[in-house]
């Protein structure tokens, strides 16, 4: 059976804003970069949104330009970004940057307890195909909870593009998303995320109507695992085996 383009890639947008959302952000900035527009849409729809910053991001200052106060600077930037996105419920868990895999079990049980209390309908987490080890580990932790969490896992992209199964229109939210990203001045110093994320979100409209100027892309997994794309599972299993990550 031959497949048409819309059978393998979205040619329309999906609105998922009417659900309570838990956002897993390995570092302060990932949430705004990867799903900032969608976060705004959940807030605008009157839904509960909670953001968890897993690590303190202390190894992001590659040249030491920002000195001993770097972690605090990133934390303050995140607070400002949350205000712009409209999020009032967020936590800093403060695990060491780039070492999240060594805290796998601790984060797993802490997140499990949070899910049982907050009871989200959707969990946003970075793609396992991201290069950063904390992004991969964050996904692996959520993946390990897949039989406990009864909702949707939304995989988002940051620096590594994924193969999405839904696109979300963030045209009306894009300026606020960019404003939130601007708060992360230490990260923008090293990488021009404003231009690069704008390019990524613009690129995601390639298959959409002209009136949609910016979109965020996600791969949605329904739990329990009855609708998981076989190609995704094959790629994920191959990747985790190659990279020796615990799932």
Image (spheres, rainbow, N blue to C red):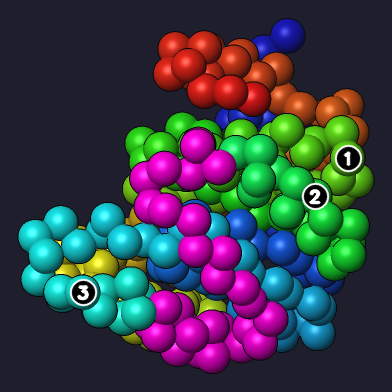
Secondary structure under the numbered disc 1 in the rendered image: loop
Q: Nearer the viewer, mark 3 or mark 2?
A: 3
Tell me the residue at 65%/55% (across/down).
124
Number of numbered discs visible in the structure rendering: 3
Secondary structure under the numbered disc 2 in the rendered image: helix
Q: Earlier in the sequence, mark 3 or mark 1?
A: 3
User: Residue 126: x and y, percent?
Assistant: 53, 47
Tell me the residue at 54%/58% (across/down).
54
- Left or right: residue 181 versus residue 186 is right
User: Residue 11: x and y, percent?
Assistant: 61, 46
Quadrant the N terminus occupies: top right
Q: Earlier in the sequence, mark 1 or mark 2?
A: 2
- Segment tinted magenta in the rendering: 75-103
Q: Report the residue marked by disc 3.
A: 68
Q: Is residue 147 magenta?
A: no
Q: Report the residue marked by disc 1.
A: 148
Q: Is residue 88 magenta?
A: yes
Q: Are marks 1 and 2 in contact (CB under 8 Å)?
A: yes
Secondary structure under the numbered disc 3 in the rendered image: helix
User: Residue 145: x and y, percent?
Assistant: 78, 38
In the picture, the disc for residue 238 is none
Tell me the residue at 55%/70% (across/down).
92
Q: Report the residue marked by disc 2.
A: 112
User: Residue 232: x and y, percent?
Assistant: 62, 24
Q: Quadrant of residue 243?
A: top left
Q: Residues within 10 Å of mark 2 (few under 14, many from 20)?
A: some
Q: Nearer the viewer, mark 3 or mark 1?
A: 3
Q: Is residue 54 above or below residue 101?
A: below
Mark-to-mark CA distance, 3 and 2: 33 Å
């Amino acid at each position: 059976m031959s497949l048409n383009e819309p059978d393998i890639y979205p040619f329309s947008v999906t609105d998922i804003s009417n659900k309570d959302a838990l956002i897993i952000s390995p570092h302060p900035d990932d949430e705004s970069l990867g799903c900032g527009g969608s976060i705004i849409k959940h807030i605008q729809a009157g839904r509960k949104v909670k953001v968890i910053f897993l690590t303190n991001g202390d190894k992001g200052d590659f040249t030491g330009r920002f000195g001993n106060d770097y972690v605090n600077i990133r934390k303050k930037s995140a607070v400002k970004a949350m205000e712009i996105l409209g999020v009032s419920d967020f936590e800093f868990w403060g695990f060491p940057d780039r070492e999240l895999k060594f805290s796998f079990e601790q984060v797993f049980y802490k997140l499990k307890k949070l899910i049982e209390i907050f009871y989200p309908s959707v969990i946003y987490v970075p793609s396992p195909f991201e290069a950063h080890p904390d992004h991969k580990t964050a996904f692996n932790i959520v993946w390990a909870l897949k039989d406990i969490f009864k909702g949707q896992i939304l995989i988002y992209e940051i620096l590594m593009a994924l193969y999405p199964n839904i696109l979300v229109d963030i045209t009306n939210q894009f300026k606020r998303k960019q404003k939130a990203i601007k708060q992360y001045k230490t990260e923008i110093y090293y990488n021009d995320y404003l231009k690069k994320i704008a390019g990524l979100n613009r690129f995601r409209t390639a298959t959409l109507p002209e009136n949609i100027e910016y979109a965020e892309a996600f791969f949605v997994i329904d739990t329990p695992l009855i609708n998981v794309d076989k190609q995704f599972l094959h790629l994920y299993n191959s990747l985790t085996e190659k990279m020796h990550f615990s799932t």
